[in-house]
Image (spheres, coloured by chain):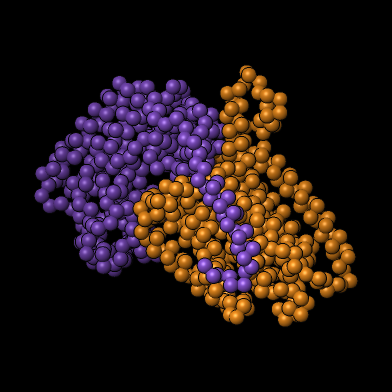
Amino acid sequence: MRFFPNLPAMRRSMAAPILGLSLAFATLQPAGAAEGVSVFSNPSKIAAIGGSITEIVYALGEEKHLVARDSTSNYPKAALALPDVGYMRALSPEGVLSVNPTGILALQGSGPKEAVDVLKKTSIPFIEVPEHFSHEGILEKVRIVGKALGVDAKAEVLAKELDAKLTSAEKQTASIKERKRILFVLSIQGGKILAAGSETAADGMVRLAGGVNAVEGFSGYKQMSDEAIITARPDVILMMSNAGPPVLDDELFGNPSVASTPAGTARKLIRIDGSYLLGFGPRTAEAIHDLAVSLYGAEVTD
Amino acid sequence: MVDQSIAGPVKVMANASEGDRSGRARIVILLLCLGLAAAVLLSLTSGASDASAINVLRDWLFGAIPSDAALNGRDSLIIYDIRLPRIILGMLVGAALAVSGAVMQGLFRNPLADPGLIGVSAGSSLGAVAVIVLGATVLAPVTALFGTLALPLAAFFGGLATTLVLYQVATRRGQTSVATMLLAGIALAALAMALTGILIFMADDRQLRDLTFWQLGSLGGATWQKIGSVGPIIILALAAMPFLARGLNALALGEATAGHLGIPIQRLKYTAIIGVSAAVGASVAVSGGIGFVGIVVPHLLRLLIGPDNRYLLPASALLGASLLLLGDAVARTIVAPAELPIGIVTAIAGAPFFLWILLRKRGVVDL
């Protein structure tokens, strides 16, 4: 550690206690609030964080309890009238507290951690709803939200209804032999394709609609090289219709590697509203149906 | 870490206007103190909620009124656990960034120098990004030990490590070459950014979103624990900087001249570098990328009170702290109940104002 050969020993010895003090503070962790609450004692004023959570509250007919939403909650239209506490991953604790909620219902992944820690320090119950990109994951969300609001019976009815809808939506494509390969493109930045790998909402939807994710070998969203896109051989490109500036078809198919794939030669591009397609909430069965029809057309059996 | 000997027996070249300049500087510093007090009050009383700082203070002094104890419980949490830590952190970060900018500009004798230039910010970012991306896997033991403080500490050590390497590269036979340091800083910043790029490539989409928000900068993560962990570092660095003022004044005349005046140049350089990397590393660590303060504040003050570092450094600390508090107050209230990243506020408010100042002056901006 002779970084400073000309540094007198006295100064070096000064640094140690300072660093020690900092580290001592660092290990002081805030005491966690009472965890494990699953029912709001007073569900009269709920802040809903996460688009699918807000949708489920509406689907349960319990929207009278909502006093705030986050910026990802854009459906149903009526929800837009609620105060917006910001993006679910960049919450402002004082903003959430300013709507005086009696309970906070947040989708897994809400944050940042510091904001959630401060919210958990209050006496306001904070319930986190897990997220799984599957048929079962949707039913689980509905049951947890219903339980939190004290409407278990209603939630069970809705869960059964969605279960039946999802099952029939998945069955529509059960008999199809030729599975389509789908490339979900999140964005095109400077000609670079940002695509969805495994463990994403897009991957879950593609599988539920009887397709195959053309991307193999990575999870999450990653930039794909030109060669990887050619190797992926997608039959169809899938995109969100409402995320940021619209990507023109020509920009997508003007990309040489995309143009050389089956999807490129047939210019096959499907655009679906982002929160509808990727929300994994009450509307997912319809979204699966729409996606399946766009993929297979007349082959879809009801 | 610093002794008085840097201050040496040097008197800056006197000129005709020295007297009224220092008088004016003292008045400006007094006004800046009042401005900071006003900014603290404004920050304490403004926010998304209707929490009343006055009531909380009254309860603290005279005991709570039972009838509204529940509401006051919420209000005191908002004041003590949300607004107050943010104010303290905002003042520390604002002062650290502004003073570091002024010291760097003096050291490099270049009005465009700022801590970002020598790679400190890039090194800090690398540390922070490493924790965000690898926190659950490779660095799990670290995050388990330090919890939410793993990120600030990693950023701080990232900045410090960059500086130490830089110093080794630029120092020959006990002499540090400022030009070499500048070039090495550019190379190290590029390397740190490339490594950050590799981490960004490895990140999953949740981590990418965290990264995006961290890079925009925010004081939103202010907690007492963070202040406890980075506060001592920033305060120590800030306390060391006034001792550099005379040395930096002499350095403006050129290194040789300053040496003949009896300034311990080498010691001045490493004190400045270590102080800046500690202050900036700790600031970047807790607040992410808040740009612009380190260049604008010292410049504005040079136009007001001249280039004498004895006044410029304390004035920069005061104005930097005030501006960041005001910026944060805007960030917290303008889109309530949501919140804007403060990096956006400082740039939108600062850049046009800075241009306007330059256009009005149209003169040579001296150091």
Q: Is residue B187 above or below residue B313?
A: below
Displayed quadrant of residue B69? top right
Q: Residue at x 27, y 29 (%)?
A: A159
In depth, the one of B200 and A57 nearer the eye is B200
Give the quadrant of the C terminus of chain B: bottom right
> Is residue B280 shown to the viewer in this render?
no
Q: Colour of chain B?
A: orange
Residue B258 location (% of width, % of height)? 75, 77
Q: Residue at x 60, y 30 (%)?
A: B75
> Is residue A230 shown to the viewer in this render?
yes
Residue B292 location (% of width, % of height)? 61, 60
Residue B179 location (% of width, % of height)? 60, 78
Q: Which chain is assigned purple?
A: A
Displayed quadrant of residue B82? top right
Q: Residue at x 50, y 39 (%)?
A: A30
Residue B114 location (% of width, % of height)? 62, 66
In depth, the one of B293 and B152 nearer the eye is B152
